[in-house]
Structure formats: structure tokens, C-alpha cells
Amino acid sequence: MSVKRIALVGSPNCGKTTLFNKLTGLRQHVAGYPGVTIEHVTGDVDLGDPEKRVELLDLPGTYSLSPISLDEQVALQALRGELDIPAPDGVIVVADATSLERSLPFVGEVLRQGLPSLLVVTMVDELKARGGALKLDLLARQLGVKAIGVVGNQGLGMDDLRDALMQVENWKCASKDTIPESELDRFVWSDELLKRALVKPDPNRGITDAVDKVVLHRVAGLVLFLVVMFLFFQVIFTVAAPLQEMLEGLVLSLGSVVGDAMSEGLLRSLIVDGIIAGVGGVVVFVPQIALLLLMISLLEGSGYMARAAFLIDRVMGWAGLEGRCFVALLSSYACAIPGIMATRSVPDNRSRLATIMVAPLMTCSARLPVYGLLIGAFVPATTVWGVFSLQGLTLFGLYLLGSLSALLAAVIFKRGALRGQTYPFYMELPPYRMPTVQVVGNYVWTGVKAFMRKAGTVILVSSVVLWALLSFPQVEPPADLDEGAARAYQIEHSAAASVGKAMEPVIKPLGFDWRIGVGLVASLAAREVIVATLAQLYAFTGDEEDLEGLGDRIRKAKGPDGAPAYTLAVALSLLVFFVYALQCISTLAVMRRETGSWKWPAVAFTYMLVLAWGMSFLTYRAALSFL
Amino acid sequence: MSEETLKSHRPGDEVEVIGVRETRDPLIARRLMALGFVPGTKVKVLRRAPLGDPVEYALRGTRISLRGSESACIEVRSCL
């Protein structure tokens, strides 16, 4: 059996990803380069021949082999076999037929590397539609390698491509003598060659240009941008929400079915209260995450993302970031996990890292149950100026606080821990295209799979640990207590309570008592867990959805001296704590995956915890003085 | 020595690239060249973003957006 490793090279937006996905399907995996924290994607091509295996190495899209960043450098080294993995057996250079004037010099540069090569020209249909024509044979002859024209998303030319992949040993190496070494000379050479081989397409991009007149218009464009953002959220909350509720119902049912089937005891508690509740609580977020990834991929694949980045780049620039970081932050309003995954589109590694570091400050949907509970219970249901609900304003204030803090934190990161060489901003605006089903599907599937794996491993462990902390040491509650009160009694004497009581001196300045401390410890794994934990602590046996009922119970809770344990000041303090603290193990796990080590997640967790404590303290003190 | 840069041109202008300055950062210059901003290339200034930056340019069959700090590195001459 022969195994051939082929590298896939091309500029961004040339259809390389579509090609990669069409050839490899779901047989892709991500691997790391030895010694560096940068990953690469490889996939196995299905050639229908068990004796011949072709492994495609998808190198990141780039405009030139002269690297200006570490990622590009690693890609170049991989191509040359300079890392500990051998050089590929061949290289496929992908170029967009409609932009050959720009990309042919790059094609030449790649061919000059001297590897057995194949040129694949994509978007030949678009070229034809715009009145252009390409003499592919002439081009192939002049370059000295085989050239194939394809229409990626329609599958045209794919058979020729697969045939070529069956015979990698026949691929030719371009002659270094025909292709100039210097970049400037290569452009001259390329222009000459294209004079003979290419009939240029109409520079007017038809529908794309017409649509851009509106989409990129100073006023209409911005308005449309806001509408798209609004729709983005509407979809999340109206489509994902019902799905999520359904999943929550399923998890609850599973819990009760298993609970009924098992006999009372520790094992049942472990499985129902620990594993099912814990893992289930995170798995219910899958619809939201999948939907976010779907929308991000559609916006990216259609070409609209580049337009959005263009419109908002200046604002992002004020935060030390760039336009492409916007979608990551926007997504983080629903859930930071897809947002962090989406930062891969940002070429500047420092900006990418800064975005990852601040994304969790954006008010994610997991905070909403906590906000709802506390605002509903403690903020008066009055109106301001007769129109604005005070509760609504408070919620808005929390959103604003998180967002502004994120932008400020980004500035501080870019100037401080992440300072360095400025990376130039350049961004291509490709023609609008139909997103490819394979590319979108793969993006969503890979993302969901990664999230579930993290939920599976990290959350499972932390759910069990948390359950153990809340259930041990086992005590015998007084016989006259009902089920809810008995559970509260158990928790009050558990290891978690000891931790909470030990923490009390630290959280007392924030207005928190040990019960809130237990809640904070519990919610480290996932924010919304505090609602369930507080419910258990206050022996609330009603429906978890009944925030009003729970809020009522909490409001009436008394401290050791008989005074109310919770006041508006405490509630505000707790709310602010939740604005800042990174209470989501899934996010930490995804950060680790995207940054290659635990260093950055640790930094994020720490700085946010410090911020949470500080801001919570300030809020509590201010509230005590002014309210 | 022409001091005219791409940054100074407004939407609708058509210019020809003379060269890319390496004074700010050779890496930036290299990348701008790879994007097609090489001597003799015709560039058309298309539009500014609503807040003034970046600016969209048409060249070599593509559309590239650059911020002012990058377009200031590209020396051009007007085409009339």
C-alpha cells in the first residue's frame, strides 16, 4: 500500500477549503506540529482504491510564501520538510481563475519550491460568466506542470482531480529556470504569461458590486449591519431556545427515569444529581452552539463577514483589534465557545489571542438565568421616566458593563502582555458566493464534536467532583425534615459548605455569606449552576424554571443575626461578580484547544477572578453608600 | 521623488503604483507586494468605510481593503 502526502496551498478565498472538504469529507483530523503550538488539518482522500492512500495537508491560505507571522512560517517549513515531519510527496496549488492576475505570481513561487506539483484552477464558471476565458493547456505547458480546471461547489472537474491524485508519481516539478526568483520579476513574468493565456473577465463583478453598493454604503450599509446583528440574535433566541428547552426536558426526564429505576442511595445520587444533571446542564447548550457555528459559517462562506469586518474595523481598531474579531465578540453574546473558535479567521495572532482573552466578558446566555433571578427578586419593578423598566435598564447596564470591559481589556492586553510587532491590516472582499454545504457542515460538525468532547471529559469530572463536595461527608438529617429541607441540611454540612465557610472572610467584603460562597464554587463549572445550587441550599423544591418562586425564597432568607441575608446591594454585587468571573470550564477547555496550552486559559481565569472580586467590592460599597 | 501615496487619494481616483516604501516595516511592504501592489499596477479607489477607515481598492481583478497606515506606504502616480 502506498501513502502519498500532498500539501494543499493557495490564497484565502480561492476555494481551497471547498476542495479540501470535497476530497476528504469527514475523514479529517487536526494534529499538532512537533514542538510548536500551531495545528494543521489533514484529511484522507477517498480514491476508491484501498492500495493507494492519499493524505492531504491543508496549509493555511496565504498570499505569499514569505512569512510575516509564525503561522505562515510554520506552514512554509512544513512545505519544505524543515519540521520533524518529512516534506510532502507533492503539492496542489489552488488558484481562483478570476484573480489570476494577483495569484499567478504566488503559483509561480510555490512551483519554484521544486516539489512534484499540480495546478488546480477554481471558479472557472465565474470567469466564463464574466466574459473571461483561460487557455489552461497553454498555462500548463508554460508552467511545466499539469493543470486542471474545477468548479468546486458543483463538483465539476473533481473526477480529473481524483485521477491525478491516483498518479502522484507522474507529477512534474516545475523548472526553476522558467520562473523568476524575485517577487517583482515574477509579477512581470506573470503579466506576460497572462497576456497570452487569459482573456480578462469584466472587472465589474455583477451582482457582487450591485449588492455592495448597499451593503458597504456609509448609511444603508451600517443600518443593514445592525439589522443582520439583530437577526443573528433573534435566530439564536427563537430557534435555539425551544430546542434547548426540549433538551432540558429530556435531561430532566432521563434524570427521573433513572432515579425511579434505582434504589435510594449514594449511587443514585451520583448518577442523577451528579452526572446527569452536570453533563446534561452543559449538553443542553449544543443547539445554541451548533446554531451559532452554522450562522458564522454561512456569513463567512457567503462573503458577508468580510463586509461586516470592513464596516466595523475602525471601532475594533480602537480596542486594539481588527474587523474580523467582531464576529467572535458578537457570537460571545450568546456563547463564547463558538466565538473563540471563530477567531481562527484572524490572521494576526496577537489580536486573535486578545479576542480570546476578552470574549468571556461579553454577556453570554448562561448568565441570563442568574441575572433573571436576582434582578427579578431585588430590583424594583418600577419604570424610569414612565417608559423604561428599571429591571430592563439594569439588565442593559450589565450587558453594557461586560461589553465595555471586554473592549477595555482588549486594549490593555494588546498594549501589555501581548504587545509586539504591529501586524498590517489587509483584507480581501471576495465576490459573494453560495456557501458550500460540505464546508459549512464540516465547520459545524467539527465545532460541536470538539465542544461535546470537552463537555464529556472535563465537565464529567468536575460534575462528579462537585457532587462529591456537596454530598460528603454524609450526615443524617433530623427525621422531621422533608426532602427539600433534608437536602439543604446535607449541603449545609458538606465539604462544599466547609469551603464556603472558609471562603467567607474573602467574600464578606462583597456582601456574600457562605451559602453564596457554595454557589460560587458550584458555578465555577458552569454559571447557571448557581441557580440550582441556591435552590437546594434554600430547600426550594419547586420547578427550577420558577425563578420568581426561588427569588421569593431567597429574599426571605435570613442571616445569622435575623436580618435579611440578601439586599439589593448584595444582589447587585453578585450580579457584577457574574459579569466578570470566568465560570465556565467548557470555555476554559476550548481556550486551551485554540491556544495550544493551559497558560492562556489560566491567565484568563485569574484576571477575570481578580476583576470580579474588585468590581463586586466596589459595587457593594457604592450600593451601601448610595442606596 | 514622488511623495504621493495611495492614502491621499479619494474614492473614484485611478492611480498607478510606483513602489512600496520599506521604511515602516519590510514585512508590511512584502505583504503589500504579494497582494499585487507592484510597480505599474493600476489601482482604483472604490470606497471608504463609514468611519473613514479602511478603504476598499480594486486591483488585479480583486478587491482589497487597507487601513491608512498601510496605504500610506504605497507610492503612486495619478492616471488621467
Image (cartoon, coloured by chain):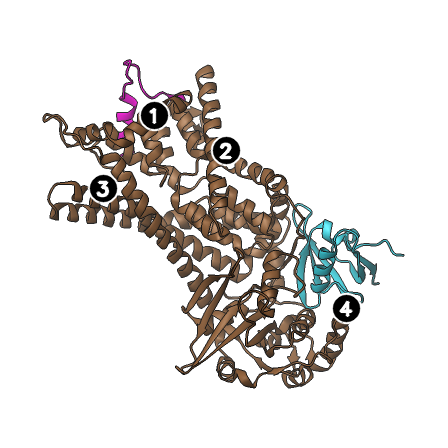
Subunit bearing disc 1: A
Q: Helix, strand or loop at disc 4?
A: helix
Tell me which corner region of the image, top left, top right, bottom left or bottom right, holds residue A195: bottom right
* Residue kind at label 1, given as amino acid type: Ala
Q: Tell me which residue sits at (28%, 50%) in the image.
A: A247
- Of label 1 and label 4, which has the lower sequence position? 4
Residue highlighted by disc 1: A502
Residue highlighted by disc 4: A184
Give coordinates of residue A197: x percent, y percent. Answer: 69, 81
Task: Kindly indicate whether the residues beneath marks 1 and 4 are on one polypeptide chain.
Answer: yes
Q: Helix, strand or loop at disc 2?
A: helix
Q: Helix, strand or loop at disc 1?
A: helix
Using the image as rendered, state which of residue A423 and residue B71 is in the foreground: A423
Using the image as rendered, state which of residue A219 and residue A179 is in the foreground: A179
Report if the CB atoms under discs 2 and 1 are less than 8 Å apart.
Answer: no
Subunit bearing disc 2: A
Subunit bearing disc 4: A
Identify by letter the chain in cyan: B
User: Magenta region: which residues?
Assistant: A546-569
Residue highlighted by disc 3: A273
* Residue kind at label 2, given as amino acid type: Leu
